[in-house]
Amino acid sequence: MIARADIPAPAGMLAELTHRCPLGCPYCSNPAELEKPASELDTATWKRVFSEAAAAGVLHVHLSGGEPCVRADIAELTAHCAQVGLYTNLITSGVGLTRKLFDALVDARLDHLQLSIQDAEASSADRIAGYDGAFARKSEVARWTVEAGLPLTINAVMHRANIARAARMVEMAVELGARRIEVAHTQYYGWGLVNRAALMPSREETEKAVAAVEDLRKTHEGRIVIDHVVPDYHARFPKACMSGWGRRTFNVTPSGKVLPCHAAETIPGLEFWNVRDRSVAAAWYDSPAFNAYRGDAWMKEPCRSCERKAIDFGGCRCQALALTGDACNADPICEKSPRHATVGAIASNESASGAIDYRYRRLNAKA
Ligand code: FES
């Protein structure tokens, strides 16, 4: 167990205000089992959580979901965050965000808006989202954001159906006036894992897209920041998931569970604390779930003696569990993992099918 004094204060918080969402994206990173609206924290509890987060050292909060704008108190919560000194980033699909609500968010001193796009072609984008008219709606929200002087980030998740237009999506973000685009290759957790066979692109498609986006980084230097989240299954080394377990950020689920990452609940035997019973600081420093994979005492070989262990922290615990059956194993994306070949085999088998047959899901207000 690491001493409290050796644990850094948290810098960021992802507030999953609700799992309700009008869209049905097949790569959704929320868990396969969504939390029902009746279990959501109320306004007063969220405000307390934000105050506690700021007191614990958190600097920025991502107001996310699901779709955070389905919460009737979203502007009130945003204003509270501003009041306690948190930088707010609204992560939205844009669908359900009316002009009136947008203006209320600006009045509430929202700092930043992050808008997801599904493709650069309207018909494909709407099919991926499972929502007719989503593409047009998003363009309008982007325009409001830029006109209001708010910094805009576009988030574009890459997979088989849209990866050929990766470069076009970057161009679209420039045209929309975004200051930053996050090109994120699908991470196969939660609902994304359920749809993996329909989402996985081939190695060739992936390499082409990565090269095209990297070229645009030079072309648009100074105009837009391009963040590129690597395509895991075709990589040699794993990503430093969450910048390391319990090192910088945490998530709070709609019902108040404090998690080290989106998919932590897939790991059996972890005990998660809830903000209804404990403070944010107590959950961060003392909860068994956060301490389970801090430091390197939990690591097995090849991670334990690896020179990269302070760079990637053994990769992703949830992916290690999903692909090897043990969250303490090296993430098999790593070429040093004895199971690395399995990852390549999954990627080529699933991309070879070519089928794009999604399983959609949708949690609405009445669920
Ligand atoms: Fe849980 Fe990566 S998603 S550690």
Image (spheres, grey):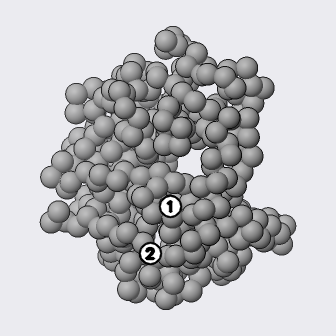
Q: For the residue marked with disc 2, what is the amino acid?
A: Asp
Badge 2 local density, few (<14 within 10 Å), some, or many (20+)? few
SS category of the residue bearing label 2: loop
Quadrant placement of the C terminus: bottom left
Above or below, 339 relative to 111: above
Give the residue drawn at x 58%, y 15%.
297
Asked whether mark 1 lies closer than 8 Å to ligand 1, one says no
> Badge 2 is on which residue?
357
Asked if the residue under mark 2 is in contact with the one under mark 1, i.e. CB atoms within 8 Å, the reply is no
Badge 1 local density, few (<14 within 10 Å), some, or many (20+)? many
Image x and y of residue 294, in percent? 54, 23
Q: Nearer the viewer, residue 340 or 136?
A: 340
Above or below, 117 relative to 274: below
- Disc number at residue 227? none
SS category of the residue bearing label 1: helix
Give the residue drawn at x 61%, y 38%.
331
Image x and y of residue 175, in percent? 65, 81
Above or below, 79 relative to 173: above
> Badge 1 is on which residue?
196
